[in-house]
């Protein structure tokens, strides 16, 4: 699916192109709508650039800084290791994605292509877990983390509870089902074992589905707030959302610094979005549809 | 040809890691939370069974009922988000230069994360001179600025607005895919039958989008029932003055992790589970009926 890029399906291509001017109405509408989505971010950006003599809140509100400065960014950068929050988030997202996709793809293969006694019961058990809200598992999950695994206040506590995803298993199972059996049989005749078939034959053919699962898992992990804020006490281990919450607590009165921090936290995901727009959109919508 | 034992074990070995993680992080917690809901527990000392005491207490707990009501009120986000997302999808579903940029702009709130967005929204609605107050004053709709963020009756509506704003771009893409699957002939037929531009969407686009609408209704209502982040970031973790913004998950979190009433919070969790289950079963019924 390439919704965000400009390729539209053939059905529309046959229509005569209307002149640019008649699009004016639509541009006005589109512009108005983008103002609604972008204005809050622009407000953050403008506030973060305001100098000490600029009013953050005033009536009528002042939008553009008269005394623009980058000092707010420097100050936040000096007082809070945002780069470390970034690395923590990156570590957690990368490991969650790798483990989750590997475990899901392993489970999806037999569900798609093998016949065995417990296939139906296991399939329905997995299906049933989709209904359980993750928030429900946080209480026992917290007790497990503190009393059994004793990995609270480590980044592993953010990774392991998110390795299992019934969503991704179904998504990848569907993808595996569309791989022709001949391909698998041919590999078996060549003497490959099942693990090798999975790795060398199946995974490469379902790469788009893997990308979809990976992006969905990564964005969810990247923006997670509730569970990480329960697990992390050590400031050096904060992820970006937890760090930004702490930053807001630290600079309660200084909205210029808070917005500078927020802008710095937004930048990485925005950059990723600009470069991999297509994967983001198909990943986020595809995963839920699968 | 009979298969050897290792061969027969293969599928289970492939499934083993997933099943282990599922058992540890989903099934065990589910059973555990059910058990804990019948106990009094503060994590430090072992749980004390108290029978139905927690549930009895819930019945008389005004904040619990408020949270339940708020969670149901939150479901109003679903119809609003569906209408807005369909309208937006219709608007961006045209071949004009630069349309890709607009689509991307509408998608940004989907990926930005609730904490940064919550901060931006606190600025927008600030009582001492945020842009919303500025605009309302300039339009002459209000006499003096409204202190939105500490006014109990505004806590939930602002959070709902934020949820809508964060989600609409995502559902727009779902509907856009749905629109592009509608055959062009249908629109031509509608035009021949004398439909104007608005009628043509009402009679062709909306029926054509029905599967997407059901899908979005299911997804967005389930996530509305579980809302937490928006409340947490907008109220700085307080739930709002007089708990005005407390929802089921927020109340669960507060009882378990702020007040250490883990048994009581587990009872709240069980209520949430029952509601989600009922909702999911209803949704499945709805989906099946639509497919007939």
Image (cartoon, coloured by chain):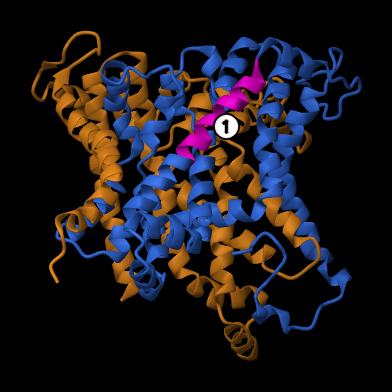
Chain colours: A blue, B orange
Could you classify mark 1 by the number of other residues whose Cα lies within 10 Å: few (under 14), some (14-19), or many (20 or more)? Answer: some
Q: Quadrant of residue B205?
A: bottom right
Task: From this view, report whether residue B153 is shown above or below residue A4.
Answer: above
Q: Where residue B283 appears, x then y in whole percent?
A: 31, 57
Can residue B200 be seen from the camera position used here? yes
Asked if residue A208 lies left or right of residue A15, the reply is left
Q: Residue at x 57, y 85 (%)?
A: B186
Residue pointed to by mark 1? A90
Q: Main secondary structure of the magenta part?
A: helix
Give A124 or A246, whichever is nearer the viewer.
A124
Range covered by the magenta-colored residues: A81-97
Is residue A134 toward the left or the right of residue A44 in the image?
left
Query: Is A49 located above or below residue B185 in the figure?
Result: above
Q: Is residue A272 left or right of residue A245?
A: right
Residue drawn at (71%, 35%), measured in percent from left and top? A41
Q: Quadrant of residue A264?
A: top right
Task: From the top left corner, tell me how far across and down residue A179 is, in percent.
Answer: 41, 70
Q: Residue at x 84, y 12 (%)?
A: A52
């Amino acid at each position: 699916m390439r919704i965000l890029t400009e390729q539209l399906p053939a059905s529309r291509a046959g229509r005569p192109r209307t002149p640019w001017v008649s699009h004016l109405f639509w541009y006005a509408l589109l512009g108005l709508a983008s103002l609604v989505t972008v204005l809050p971010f622009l407000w953050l950006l403008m506030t973060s650039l305001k100098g000490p003599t600029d009013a953050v809140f005033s009536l009528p509100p002042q939008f553009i800084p008269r005394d623009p400065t980058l000092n707010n960014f420097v100050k936040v950068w000096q007082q809070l290791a945002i780069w470390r929050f970034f690395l923590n988030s990156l570590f957690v997202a990368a490991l969650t994605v790798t483990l989750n996709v590997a475990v899901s793809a392993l489970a999806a293969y037999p569900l798609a292509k093998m016949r065995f006694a417990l296939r139906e019961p296991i399939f329905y058990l997995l299906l049933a877990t989709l209904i359980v809200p993750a928030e429900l598992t946080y209480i026992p999950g917290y007790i497990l983390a503190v009393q059994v695994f004793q990995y609270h206040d480590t980044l592993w506590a953010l990774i392991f509870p998110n390795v299992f995803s019934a969503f991704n298993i179904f998504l990848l199972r569907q993808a595996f089902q569309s791989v022709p059996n001949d391909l698998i049989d041919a590999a078996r005749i060549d003497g490959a074992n099942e693990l090798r078939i999975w790795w060398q034959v199946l995974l490469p053919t379902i790469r788009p589905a893997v990308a979809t699962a990976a992006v969905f898992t990564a964005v969810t992990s990247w923006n997670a707030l509730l569970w990480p804020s329960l697990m992390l006490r050590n400031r050096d281990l904060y992820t970006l959302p937890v760090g930004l919450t702490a930053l807001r607590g630290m600079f309660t009165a200084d909205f210029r610094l808070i917005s500078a921090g927020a802008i710095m936290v937004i930048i990485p995901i925005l950059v990723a979005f600009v470069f991999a727009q297509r994967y983001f959109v198909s990943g986020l919508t595809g995963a839920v549809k699968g | 040809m009979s298969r050897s034992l290792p061969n027969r074990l293969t599928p289970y070995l492939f499934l083993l890691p997933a099943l282990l993680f599922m058992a540890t992080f989903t099934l065990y917690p589910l059973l555990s939370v059910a058990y804990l809901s019948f106990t009094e527990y503060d994590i430090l000392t072992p749980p004390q069974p108290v029978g139905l005491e927690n549930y009895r207490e819930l019945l008389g707990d005004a904040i619990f009922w408020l949270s339940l009501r708020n969670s149901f009120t939150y479901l109003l986000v679903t119809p609003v988000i569906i209408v807005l997302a369909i309208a937006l999808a219709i608007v961006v579903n045209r071949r004009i230069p630069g349309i890709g940029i607009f689509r991307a702009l509408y998608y940004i709130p989907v990926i930005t994360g609730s904490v940064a967005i919550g901060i931006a929204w606190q600025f927008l609605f600030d009582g001492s001179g945020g842009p919303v107050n500025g605009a309302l004053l300039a339009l002459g709709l209000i006499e003096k600025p409204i202190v939105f963020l500490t006014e109990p009756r505004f806590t939930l509506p602002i959070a709902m607005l934020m949820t809508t704003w964060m989600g609409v771009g995502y559902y727009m893409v779902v509907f856009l895919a749905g629109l592009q699957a509608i055959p062009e002939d249908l629109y031509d037929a509608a035009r021949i039958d004398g439909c104007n531009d608005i009628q043509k969407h009402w009679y062709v686009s909306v029926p054509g989008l029905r599967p997407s609408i059901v899908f979005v209704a299911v997804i967005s209502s389930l996530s509305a029932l579980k809302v937490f982040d928006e409340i947490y970031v907008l109220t700085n973790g307080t739930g709002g003055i007089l708990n005005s913004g407390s929802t089921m998950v927020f109340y669960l979190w507060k009882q378990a992790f702020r007040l250490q009433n883990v048994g009581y919070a587990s009872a709240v969790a069980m209520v949430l589970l029952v509601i989600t289950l009922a909702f999911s079963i209803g949704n499945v019924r709805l989906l099946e009926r639509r497919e007939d």
